[in-house]
Image (spheres, grey):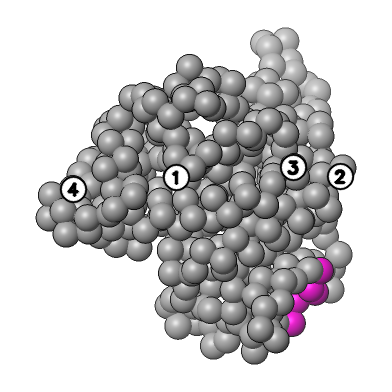
Amino acid sequence: MECAISHLYYIVFESRLIFIVFTNDSSSSGVSVCVWVLTCFVPAGIMSTMSDFQFLHDSTSSLWTVLAPKRILRPGGEERGRMPQCPFCEHGTEEIEVDRIDRHGQWAVRVVKNAYPFAPVHEIIIHSPHHDKDIDHLTEPEVEDILTMFRRRFQTHQSAGQVVIFHNSGHEAGASLSHPHSQLVVVPHNVKLSIRSIPGIAPYVPHADKRIPTHYAFTHDSLTIMCPPTSQWPDEVWLIPTQSTGTFADARDEDLSRLARALNHVIVLLKARHQSDIPYNFYISPYHHWYIRIMPRVKTLGGFELATGVSVMSQSPEETLAFLQEHWETPDFDRIRTHQKAHYAHGV
């Protein structure tokens, strides 16, 4: 019998290095696969020299995984009283700063290096000095400052790889710290990302010079607000500048001004509809024909969705769009609270 190692992975947990080894054992009866799990204690000095991350490719599915064991050490849990001082507030800014926008003699938006990266470039964009103010509680100029910083950092890194800017709001959406912030990650060009493109949903986007609502989108102030029929999350919303032919690096100042107003407005309306500070994510497409995609994380993925990659939706995108159109210019929060509360199943 011959034994050969086919794959070797490791994870770090509580100062222990755990190896997971896949071997192929060949014999006259055929080939079998064995899995070995080996655990050893790692001193802190050696732990600090370990690789921060690895991009691993599954050749059979063409999917990628980032192995970043050091991220288990990142701070978090202040909601449960375990963090005496927020590292993003003004009194706790010890991270390496790489950029900032100042207003009225103090910082308005800061960018620091992520101490627990999972990519060659990994930055944290702190939205404001205010610990408890999410985007829906900021002024439009403050949100515009955030988007301006997004564009500036995108321009800085666009030649280094695929620039992905994303935001996690709430623990269920992946936020480890509650102080509002977004992240920028540069992914190597050889890693194929599964990011949807506007051309794939072009039939549902109104023509740029026609403000004619469709079942899935409408235009307002040179901006398309869309709820695609293939939405994967309840109340999913896309914001698309009508002139978004280039990448986000090419975004015009007037685009950012409109987006700041629309992004703030969508989050206000969705939180009113759900009557809570719902967890949500958004990201900016790194490619040409860019957009912002907002995804409320109000459902739990079921086994079928995880097994197949096929989403099951119980919330009609058409209904979401109709809700947004009704309240876009003059929101009626009493009607939203009494007659338009969101209702749908939370799992599949």
Name the mark on residue 160.
2
Q: Is residue 24 left or right of residue 194?
A: right
Label 1 residue SS: strand
> Which residue is at the far left?
338
Give the dominant element type of the magenta stretch: helix, strand or loop: loop
Q: Secondary structure at mark 4?
A: loop
Residue tagged 3: 250
Q: Quadrant of residue 164?
A: top right
Residues at circles 3 and 1 in contact by the CB criterion of under 8 Å: no
Check residue 340 in the rendering and tell me which mark sits there, or answer none. Answer: 4
Q: Nearer the viewer, residue 335 or 10?
A: 335
Q: Residue at x 48, y 35 (%)?
A: 224
Label placed on residue 295: 1
As drawn, the label of residue 258 is none
Closer to the eye: label 4 or 2? 4
Q: Judge by depth and name the residue closer to the eye, 99 or 1.
A: 99
280 versus 113 height, above or below: above
Name the kind of residue labelled 2 in the image: Ala
Say which amino acid is labelled 3: Asp
Q: CA distance from mark 4 to mark 1?
A: 19 Å
- Residue 18 visible to an observer of this rendering: no
Q: Could you tell me which secondary element the residue under label 3 belongs to?
A: helix
The local secondary structure at tag 2 comes to loop
The boundaries of the magenta stretch are 94-98
The answer to which of marks 4 and 1 sits earlier in the sequence is 1
- Callout 1–callout 2 Cβ contact below 8 Å: no
Q: Residue at x 67, y 11 (%)?
A: 29
Look at the image and tell me in which quarter the N terminus lies. Answer: top right
* Comes first in the chain, label 4 or label 2: 2
Left or right, 34 with reference to 159 = left
Q: Residue at x 54, y 27 (%)?
A: 208
